[in-house]
Image (tube, grey):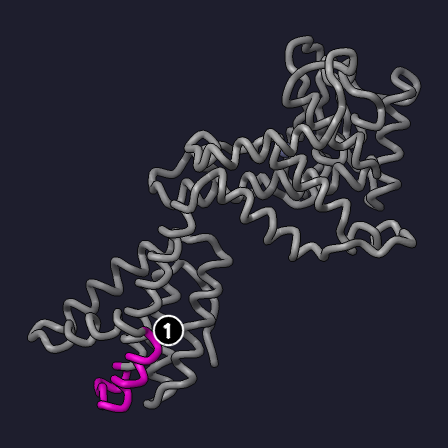
Amino acid sequence: MRVSKEILPKVGTAIETVFKRIKIENNFNFFVTADNNQANASCSLMSSASRPDIVLTSRLIELLSLEELQFVIGHEVAHFVYQHALYPNHNNVDDRNLKLNILNLSRAAEISADRIGFLACNSLEDSLRANFKLASGLSDKHFNFKPSTYLDQLRDLEDLGKSSTELWSTHPSFLIRMQSLIWFSMTKEYHEFFDNKKKGTYNLREIDEKLDIKIKKITGDELEISNKEIYEKALIWGSLDIYLSDKKFSKIEQNEFASRFGKKANKAISLLKMSSARDMLDKKIDISFTEASKLLKTEKDKLVEELKTVGKETGGDKMKKLKILGKLLNILGIKKPVSF
Ligand SMILES: [Zn+2]
């Protein structure tokens, strides 16, 4: 059933309030579907070209107060505005590291959407209650609302150490989501958004870092370590290729290379002493950059920037170095001209 203010005046008003608060034009269609089991909302059309549909289940509307419903509506609107549906689908991917990166991104998308949900209802308590109700399925009469006890549960979860359930999950634990909302409510950015007189204790970057540490305690650092390994391998072999652009590798250059990469540099340099050095290096580059092509875009962009710095700081012909960079970018799947 399509939501209209005539049929569902309270829900209609809640929707209006959300768009006013988050300062976005309402070009969405809202529907309610009969489902008494699942308290759920979804955004069913994700292309920015057409009018998106947001579907709320009847159970969701029965379970939540109108303020809590505003949180959920804001959350769904955010998924559309941020175009999260354009993220790659982890189900279509075999590579373990890539799959984990996509799941990590998917959990980050939930955290972002929650923040917009919070702005949409402009109440920390209602945001937390909505989260709790969706996680437990319980209505008001069954629970005591005390955020501090949830944070105790989060600490218990941290004490248990890394959990593969969390690592492989598309959504963060509701405990993480609650912690994230509490910190978000303390940011300068939040207070600025509503022109509050209060200043806020943290900025967004600070709470993102705090959150990252919490999340890693629960998911473990497997993903971070494997991303770093892939990144560093590509960086060292790519850099070596740039150093060799003029087919020379002088003592000075070798020392430079060694001070840039430490112990790992010696291993790479010793490879060059073999008779089939060029073939070996080409193979190393091919393997390491194919692996790196599966990193997330932000990581790949960072890698390109570091390789450009290497290009700038080494001697030799600039055009030759640019040509090598172009080849490396091509394996990474980045299709744009490169210059430094
Ligand atoms: Zn979501």
Q: Amino acid at mark 1?
A: Leu
Whole-percent x and y of residue 59? 72, 13
Compared across the picture, whether 198 is left or right of 42 comes to right
For the question of whether residue 88 can be seen, the reply is no
Which quadrant does ligand 1 occupy?
top right
Circle 1 sits on which residue? 325
Whole-percent x and y of residue 250? 23, 90
* Residue 76, picture quadrant: top right
> Which of 61/200 is in front?
200
Looking at the image, residue 25 lies above or below residue 126: below
- Residue 253 inside the magenta-drawn segment: yes
- Give the extent of the magenta segment: 244-261
SS type, badge 1? helix
Compared across the picture, whether 298 is left or right of 75 comes to left
Compared across the picture, whether 262 is left or right of 60 comes to left
Residue at figure coordinates x 28%, y 75% from the top left: 241
> Which of 6/78 is in front?
78
